[in-house]
C-alpha cells in the first residue's frame, strides 16, 4: 500500500491515479469516498457541518481505507490535522508491513498557482492559509516514510520519483 499525503495542490489525487495504474493497484481517494458516502460535495459538508465535522468523517474514511484492500490511497491535505488519523498513519507500518506513507512536497505559492480559486476546495477561502500550511509541515514530516519534491516536475515525473524514493526514503 502507498498512502500519499501533502498539502492541497501537491498532486496527491493526480499522482495517485498514475501510480496505481503503474503498479496495477486500485486507486482510492479519501475525498472521493467521503463524497460518495455523504452524497454531498466536500464544499457542501464544510458549509453545512463545518470543518471539524468534515475531519471526523474524513478520519472514518481514512481508517477504513488503511485497513482495506491493497491500493494506492490519496488523502486530503488536512487529514493529518486529526489526531486519530495521525495515530493511524503512524501505526500503518506495523499493521501493514511494507506500506509506505509518501509526502508530496509543495510550497504554498505553487499550490495556489495549481489550484487557482477552485470552489471545490473550501480551505482556499481561509485568510490564514499560510499558517495552515506551516502548521501542517511537522505533521506531514512525522507520518511520512518517504518525501518527494514536486516543484518543476510533471505528475508523471513525480510518480517516477515516488517509485525511486522507495530505495532511499528521499527522491533527491
Ligand atoms: N506536479 C505537478 N505539476 C503541475 N501541476 C500539477 C502537478 N500535480 C498536480 N497538478 C495539478 O494541480 C492541481 C491539483 O492536483 P490534485 O491532484 O488535485 O492535488 P491534491 O489532490 O494534492 O490536492 C490539478 O489541476 C493538477 O492537474
Ligand atoms: O487541505 C484541506 O484541508 C483539504 C484538502 C482537500 O483535499 P486535497 O488535498 O486533495 O485538495 C479536501 O480534503 C478538503 O477540501 C480539505
Ligand atoms: Mg486530492
Image (cartoon, helix red, strand yellow):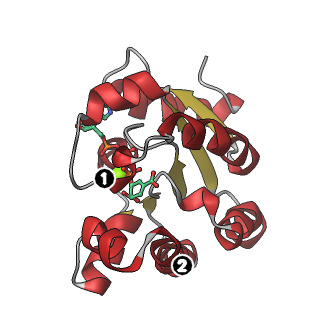
On the image, the x and y values in percent for residue 138 come to 73, 41
Work out whether 152 lies above or below 124: above
Task: Name the N-terminal-most of marks 1 and 2.
Answer: 2
- Residue for point 53% across, 73% down: 52
Q: Quadrant of residue 156?
A: top left
Query: Do we see residue 150 in this rendering?
Result: no
Q: Residue furthest front?
A: 127
Lateral position of residue 8 relative to residue 33, left or right: right
On the image, the x and y values in percent for residue 121 come to 30, 52
Placement of the N terminus among the 4 image quadrants: bottom right
- Residue for point 53% across, 54% down: 2
Query: Do we see residue 85 in this rendering?
Result: yes
Q: Residues at badges 1 and 2 in contact (C-beta under 8 Å)? A: no
Residue position for label 1: 121
10 Å crowding of disc 2: few (<14), some (14-19), many (20+): some
On the image, the x and y values in percent for residue 16 come to 37, 48
| Dot label at residue 56 | 2
Q: Quadrant of residue 73?
A: bottom left
- Residue for point 47% across, 28% down: 108
Amino acid at each position: 500500500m502507498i498512502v500519499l499525503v501533502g498539502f492541497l495542490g501537491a498532486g496527491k489525487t493526480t499522482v495517485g491515479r498514475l501510480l496505481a495504474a503503474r503498479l496495477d493497484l486500485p486507486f482510492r481517494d479519501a475525498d472521493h469516498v467521503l463524497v460518495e458516502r455523504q452524497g454531498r460535495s466536500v464544499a457542501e459538508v464544510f458549509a453545512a457541518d463545518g470543518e471539524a465535522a468534515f475531519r471526523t468523517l474524513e478520519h472514518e474514511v481514512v481508517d477504513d481505507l488503511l485497513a482495506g484492500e491493497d491500493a494506492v490511497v490519496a488523502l486530503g491535505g488536512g487529514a493529518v490535522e486529526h489526531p486519530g488519523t495521525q495515530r493511524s498513519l503512524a501505526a500503518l507500518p506495523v499493521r501493514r508491513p511494507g506500506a509506505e506513507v509518501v509526502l508530496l512536497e509543495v510550497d504554498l505559492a505553487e499550490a495556489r498557482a495549481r489550484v487557482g480559486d477552485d470552489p471545490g476546495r473550501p480551505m482556499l477561502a481561509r485568510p490564514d492559509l499560510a499558517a495552515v500550511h506551516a502548521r501542517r509541515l511537522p505533521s506531514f514530516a512525522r507520518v511520512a516514510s518517504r518525501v518527494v519534491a514536486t516543484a518543476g516536475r510533471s505528475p508523471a515525473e513525480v510518480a517516477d520519483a515516488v517509485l525511486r524514493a522507495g530505495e532511499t526514503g528521499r527522491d533527491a
